[in-house]
Image (spheres, rainbow, N blue to C red):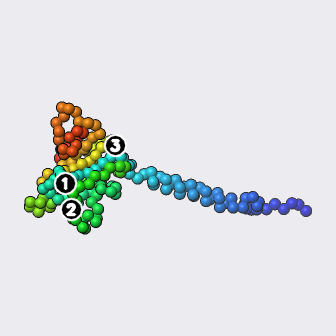
Amino acid sequence: MGVFFDIRPHADPRARGMGLRATLLPALLLALSLVLAACASGPRLVDHGFGFDAVADSPGVQVLDYRYGQSHAPGARMPQWARDDAGVAGGTHTRGPMPVGDSLYVRWRIRATGEVLEDTVDLRGRLPSDMAGREIYFVVDQRQLQVYLVGTRARGAGDAGIGPAKFRLREIERIYPP
């Protein structure tokens, strides 16, 4: 009699499981590439700073709430415990890798009148494309929020000083109000 050949796909013992491997491997590679793409598509982190000092710069107001962009970096938004316990923030300063904020929200109370005001500043188009090493800093002057961009270089000898005294030796630009 003749030789019997089994033509089924998994007849050869060496081929057993190849169907599963052939299906599973591409699926795993696809899943891995999707996870890596999702991680890479988050906001770009830039080493820069954000801060304010209401005690020194805005003695006539109480800052009730603030939020720099959507960052969850410590200090970039008023912590819930501070809102619950003290109800006001005296200041903050945070520096390090974080997303560059597209907005700045501040709510404050004028001590003399008790009036509560708030302002949201759209930072898009007001910030340079390279924020590395720079700082966003705000001051509340009674009814007006002022936002400054503190640069990385020293201020020139002939440059007029603007903004908070603590930055008198650095280049600084008021970006809001224009």
Residue 158, percent from left and from top = 18, 32
- State the residue in front, 104 or 169: 169
Residue 31, percent from left and from top = 53, 57
Please name the residue that numbered disc 3 is placed on. Answer: 132
Instruction: Quadrant for the N terminus, please.
Output: bottom right
Is 29 situated left or right of 41 in this image? right
Q: Residue 54 carries which label?
A: 1
Q: Which of marks 3 and 1 is in front?
A: 1
Q: Is mark 3 on a helix, strand or loop?
A: loop
Instruction: Identify the amino acid type marked 1.
Output: Ala
Residue at 28 percent across and 37 percent down: it is 153
* Quarter location, residue 116: bottom left
Q: Give whichever of discs 3 and 1 has the lower sequence position.
A: 1
Please name the residue that numbered disc 2 is placed on. Answer: 88
Q: Is mark 2 on a helix, strand or loop?
A: loop
Instruction: Identify the amino acid type marked 3.
Output: Ala
Q: Do the residues labelled 3 and 2 touch (CB within 8 Å)?
A: no
Residue at 16 percent across and 53 percent down: it is 58
